[in-house]
Image (spheres, rainbow, N blue to C red):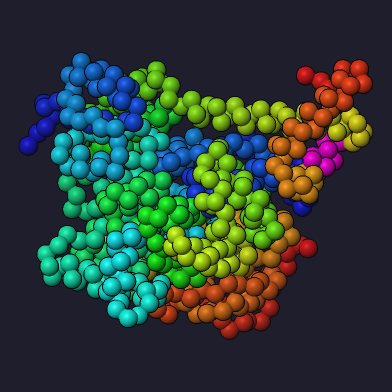
Amino acid sequence: MTGQQDKTHPEKVDLQIGFVPLSDCAPLVAAYEKGFFESEGLHVTLGRERSWAAIRDKTAFGVYDAAQMLYPMPLASTLGVGGPVVPMVSGLCLSLGGNAITVSEALFAEMDAAVGDEDLAETNSALAVAKIVAARREAGQPALKFGCVFPTSTHHYELRHWLRSAGVDCDLDVELSVVPPPDMPEAMRSGSIDGFCVGEPWNSITVQRGWGRIVMTKHTLWNNGPEKVLGVTQAWAEQHPATHRAVLRAIIAAAAWCDEPANRDELARMIAAERYLDVPLEAVRPSMLGELRFTQDGPLVEMPDFMVFHRYAANFPWVSHGRWFLEQMTAAGQIDEADYAPEEFDSIAAEVLRPEAYREASAELGLAYPIIDHKPEGVHPEKWTLTQSTRPIVMGPDRLLDDQTFSVSSEPSAEPPSEPHGHAPAPS
Amino acid sequence: MSKKDTPLRIMIADDDQGRAHTLAGALTHAGYQVVAVSAGDTQLPAVVADSEPDLVLINTGSPSRDTLEQLTTIRHQQPRPVVMFASDEDRETIRAAVQAGVSAYVTQGVENARVTSVIETAIAQFNQHQCVVDELKKTKQTLEERKTLDRAKGILMKRRGCGEEEAFKLLRQAAMNHKKRLGQVAEEIVQAAALMDAGMGAVKGVER
């Protein structure tokens, strides 16, 4: 029962796929529960892991055929950052956004006082922290402590991005440590950390318990910034090209289903269940519906793009996003420029991110896809239309905090729209 | 300076304290020095700093592993344990370890060859203490669901005289239309079929 266009027989149909209990595992859960895997002839068992290191190692050793991974993980594994060298590839981005930075009630009160008459908002939150950092240093008080979920995590770089925007040096001015997501609320309540960056539902759970307040969302740091990918080892991808494509087709179709507003309520119920997140429905439901409560008694703020699963070409593995994360790893001191020079980043990223695999799967599904591999960031404050694609694709804003920009280095920018390309259009 | 003659300093981090202590006993008996046994939590880096192990053994699936991982990317960190892996000759050992659910972090400078037998002891202990019950349960659950799906397809094929692909499409459509999980729809069909067949006395309607 493979897709209609593709008659290639998958090399392997019984698959183990790893996931971490976070809201953005949704496309994998939906692919299983709504029959997207089965309709590609794939019999999938989803394996829940509470450690990113376990996801990495079990994928590296073939316990898992594929797994939900933090966007930087396949890059880190390929270069051996923080672990052994195991080349990995990704042909699919699972989600955009979905993270937030939450601070303790005590730190919030300090931040609120630090901004004086101004209202404390996302836009001045880093500045407020910078003032507190300076005051504490002056008074010889201990540095603020922030938690993130893994050394090579989007969350780590997002914390750095946020604090750097106000001139805070994450290596000197604050203490960063790794805390597993489910332990974040308790770590904050007990005072062992003052703030953290984590994916949902752990921000909302902390807010609902009255232990902290959200002060920054990933969406504001980077509108529609990429978050999780489906990672496989390069060796696995080479041995199972047809299975890889079938997995990509199933998940792309499932991600499209997940992105339909009409399905989000059902999706929230599905992932809250005991075998997946095992949390109360109310912990996952609001952000899944595109609404976020920043404080326990505050209003639900509408954020329709808080977590994106498919629209805006969300599933496309942009090579330029790979370079973005290699630059973040370098800034965090995880990649030594003596080992890998920035000029090599595009080619390293192109080894790991595999747009061509995505394009083949998309074409087989009859979906439009980009025909370029790189796109600039921070240049579209509003929705825009990508024309360098098989059919025009509506893209989301890509604004970065403080109006920074990120340019593509080796390909012409996606702007302005070019002449129609010679690429064959996707079958419709 | 050669540390070759001094016994390896081993730290064990496992939320299953019974298993941790059994393993500690076995390693001590074999002449190793167990310098710390921890339940594994966010304080792990501090325990590593205090006990200065050559080797950390930790439950593969433990969330605390990620806490330990932060030590691997901090350049000035001493001791700096790095997850043990893959030179070709011990690839199978490490693979067996991952499957048994134990991971090893080795401090830089300690040769892999020196720790292989420690890991083999740990694998044996972990294989005895089946802590992977949860995973087995899930795999079984998935297999059950697949079996139910096949039965539901069979029922539809028989009653509607259609092929397997058509039967699957019907099930899938029902799941989509009624906002249900595919497994739930399949289960309901199997139950309804059993009920109807029992009611009509034609008990042989459903196979298996």
Q: Nearer the viewer, residue A282 or A409?
A: A282
Q: Residue furthest top?
A: B29
Looking at the picture, how far across and down is residue B175, in whole percent? 75, 44
Q: Residue furthest left?
A: B1
Quadrant for the C terminus of chain B, please.
top right
Question: Going 57% across and 30% down the picture, which residue do you hit?
Answer: B139
Q: Nearer the viewer, residue A246 or A401?
A: A401
Question: Going 13% across and 70% down the picture, which residue do you hit?
Answer: A138
Q: Is residue A384 above or below residue A175?
A: below
Whether residue B54 appears in this view of the structure is yes
Whether residue A96 appears in this view of the structure is no
Q: Residue furthest bottom?
A: A416
Question: Going 87% across and 36% down the picture, which residue do you hit?
Answer: B163
Q: Is residue A288 left or right of residue A352?
A: right
Question: Is B166 one of the magenta-colored residues?
Answer: yes
Q: Is residue A243 left or right of residue A20?
A: right
**Total labels drawn:** 0
The secondary structure making up most of the magenta span is helix
Tell me the magenta residue range: B163-171
Q: Nearer the viewer, residue A309 or A76?
A: A309
Looking at the picture, how far across and down is residue A310, in whole percent? 62, 61
Quadrant for the N terminus of chain B, please.
top left
Looking at the picture, how far across and down is residue A328, in whole percent? 36, 64
Question: Is A150 one of the magenta-colored residues?
Answer: no
Q: Nearer the viewer, residue A330 or A283?
A: A283
Q: Is residue B127 above or below residue B49?
A: above
Q: Is residue B106 left or right of residue B170?
A: left
Question: Going 41% across and 72% down the picture, which residue do you hit?
Answer: A122
Looking at the picture, how far across and down is residue A55, in whole percent? 45, 42
